[in-house]
Image (cartoon, coloured by chain):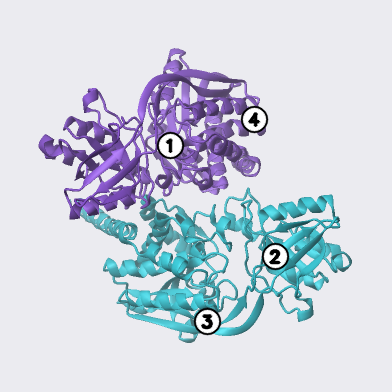
Chain colours: A purple, B cyan
Amino acid sequence: MKHLALTLAMLLSFSGFAQTDAQVFKSIYSASLTKGKSYEWLDYLSNQIGGRLSGSLNAEKAVQYTKEELEKLGLDKVWLQPVMVPKWVRGNKEYAFIESGSGVTTTVNICALGGSVATPIGGLKAPVLEVDGIASLQALGKEQVAGKIVFFNRPMQPDIIQTFEAYGGCVDQRYAGAMEAGKLGAVGVIVRSLTLRMDDLPHTGSMTYGNLPNAQRIPSAAISTNDAEKLSAMLALDPSLKFFFNQTCRQLADVESFNVIGEIIGSEFPNEYIIVGGHLDSWDLGDGSHDDGAGCAQSMEVLRLFKELGIKPKRTLRVVLFMNEENGLRGAKKYAEEAKQKNENHIFSLESDAGAFTPRGFQFDCDDAFMDKMAKWEPLFKPYLIHYFERGFSGADVAPLKTDSNVCAGLRPDSQRYFDHHHAANDVFEHVNKRELELGAATMASLIYLIDKYGI
Amino acid sequence: MKHLALTLAMLLSFSGFAQTDAQVFKSIYSASLTKGKSYEWLDYLSNQIGGRLSGSLNAEKAVQYTKEELEKLGLDKVWLQPVMVPKWVRGNKEYAFIESGSGVTTTVNICALGGSVATPIGGLKAPVLEVDGIASLQALGKEQVAGKIVFFNRPMQPDIIQTFEAYGGCVDQRYAGAMEAGKLGAVGVIVRSLTLRMDDLPHTGSMTYGNLPNAQRIPSAAISTNDAEKLSAMLALDPSLKFFFNQTCRQLADVESFNVIGEIIGSEFPNEYIIVGGHLDSWDLGDGSHDDGAGCAQSMEVLRLFKELGIKPKRTLRVVLFMNEENGLRGAKKYAEEAKQKNENHIFSLESDAGAFTPRGFQFDCDDAFMDKMAKWEPLFKPYLIHYFERGFSGADVAPLKTDSNVCAGLRPDSQRYFDHHHAANDVFEHVNKRELELGAATMASLIYLIDKYGI
């Protein structure tokens, strides 16, 4: 009888425990889906401000707007953290064509890569050398590369299920292609856009010249996938064709910008920090809705949900809207540097920077013990169709905070459509679904709730 | 030593077994994503044919097109199964406005519900009675309902995670609203569109008059969610306002149409049938890409993948493209009837009719034993992010095939965006993502491969 009573007590206590968390989850999801603010914030960032390239007027507008919105939430503290950021400007709309031996020209869609130098005034015309990657380029050597426009045309692999992995298999062409081609005497670089979709939109993104002297810094642009196929097909017929492109982009002096930070001070462990964030800057071709206005709006929504639902965190909960993720990571570096200086113990840092699509789960940069803990929490997420809990990369902005003893994590939304929009003119608000965005915010808030309550 | 050898043999045999299936899965997904035909087929159905209302010329074009495409696949048999279907026609574009007491009119967006009668010639104008459902209507009684246009305005619940469940909570208004209002002397019915999105598009769908005499059959239309909100707000200010609508739709005599069927005869158990299907008809406002051109293209792709990869099924594998799911289910009933007459043993029937979005898993109408079997297969699906395996409703077209001993199933794609497009003018090809469609086809083919190999 005593044994039975004990069992009953344990069952009741267990179900009491479980039900409480399940109920909080339900209230978080319900609040996000019925009276959430994330979609409204994203609408403003996207449609009233627009693309937010580091150092631009729009980026500064976004800093002011999000600071003001955070101030309305009744957090304990909202502030701006100054950081110097690079200021790269695109200049005039880029222009390019393929010129056949007979002089007939075919216009194609390109855009300068972020950080690229301009072409010489009036543009650049040269024969084209198509390669499938940096290794192939290097194998050809200076003699075949010098004087050419190098055309990197390795496509993202469609049979890789997780599109970020396919992206990882190609991004070296965009990031380091111009640097490596410049070393071999090439005069320009054209890179196939990093998307799995066949369309006419060029996709920009960051690139580097490393420590190359100015003389070897050659202009670099992305070409749409349809035009990459066209150029490749025309080259097969006429290897002596020429490519022309003109771009007037340039790198100006660094300017001051800001990370935007808001916090609720923890009631029991104020010196343990949990942060949630996205990046406020974006590329300039679209309005940066998926990358990463969404992550900012969702991160702000996490703190708003805590306030609205009266959940008082035991640990200090911060939202950080990082500046300059796209072309410098200066905001992330500055934040991590100051956190270290101040000896702030960041136990858990969560980033949303993989689009506003239906959330599937999280990736954790952590030890086995944390994954065991997480496994016990997974059933709480099941009613919300959150099923993906894997070890792996967290996110570019939170990764600098990683230590031996803390956890960094990234929200993982469905990735199938992400690269259709990534860094292109169609990364715009209309391609964000309200429910998917709100489900992401609720999923983040639910995890943060558990981390705050039980620690790592 | 003998024991060790046995263990080793078992391990090898197990890993041999497991790896083979994993390899087949990989080849199926890879073939669908790199050289699949589903997107091309759907493009034709959507953009070259268009909306395929039962009994329409487009529906007949779709029958001929898919039959011809199946014939190209080298199946053992392709045929048309005749079936008489209802022929409802929309007539002229519907027109509606709200008229205030002062005679000012506000145009709103409506569309006739499928199966509705027309308004009287020149249209219908009457005061409006807003209700939140059939029960509320019935509570009001004849006195308050007679002579009114009944406005059903219960919205789908946004805090239900699975949108089909939210739909299920509201669809009675659309399906039976006019029948119930007609019994109480109402003159017309306006139903809030069944979508979670706030926009200007009316969403059609089937409705019934049951056995009501013609005199009580009143016209019924859907109104866009934005206009439903507008009408409700205006009614709150002026309960005596009137609503006008005009529609010229009508029900003609039944016409002959067809289910399109193709099969590969099983090598070991030809009398055990496994079918995979979608429905070829659609509503007429969009081109029926998600509902259900996608399901047809994916089902055809399952058999094409078997042929391309040289997988010879042990059981007879059929693709069935059902006619008239939307407003009669005549194709499904005919197919089930003939299968019964011929004593065909349909051990497993899989339907795709929930959109072309990223596949998440399946719902099974089955017994516990099958779910146990399925649980052992789940790890094979994990690399493809397929995680949802639950008991539940299969699909409208395969449900009539259910017996005590077989299994019916439905593909379950991500449902968050589905009702944004369902039965509306924006259910069009451009809202289908190629990879998501192809992942769905591969997921279906992989399950069918296991069912064929191991049975149920």
**Residue highlighted by disc 4:** A307
**Cα distance, mark 2 to mark 4?**
46 Å
Disc 4 is placed on an element classified as helix
Quarter location, residue A19: top right
Q: Are marks 4 and 3 in contact (CB under 8 Å)?
A: no
Q: Nearer the viewer, residue A441 or A381?
A: A441
Q: Are marks 3 and 1 on the same chain?
A: no
Q: Are marks 1 and 2 in contact (CB under 8 Å)?
A: no
**Cα distance, mark 3 to mark 2?**
37 Å
The residue furthest left is A143
Q: Is residue A350 left or right of residue A445?
A: left
Q: Are marks 1 and 2 on the same chain?
A: no
The chain under label 3 reads B
**Residue highlighted by disc 2:** B95
Amino acid of disc 1: Asp
**Residue highlighted by disc 3:** B334
**Cα distance, mark 1 to mark 2?**
60 Å
Crowd class of label 1 (few under 14; some 14 to 19; many from 20; radius 10 Å): few
Provide residue B65's location: percent of width, then percent of height. 41, 75
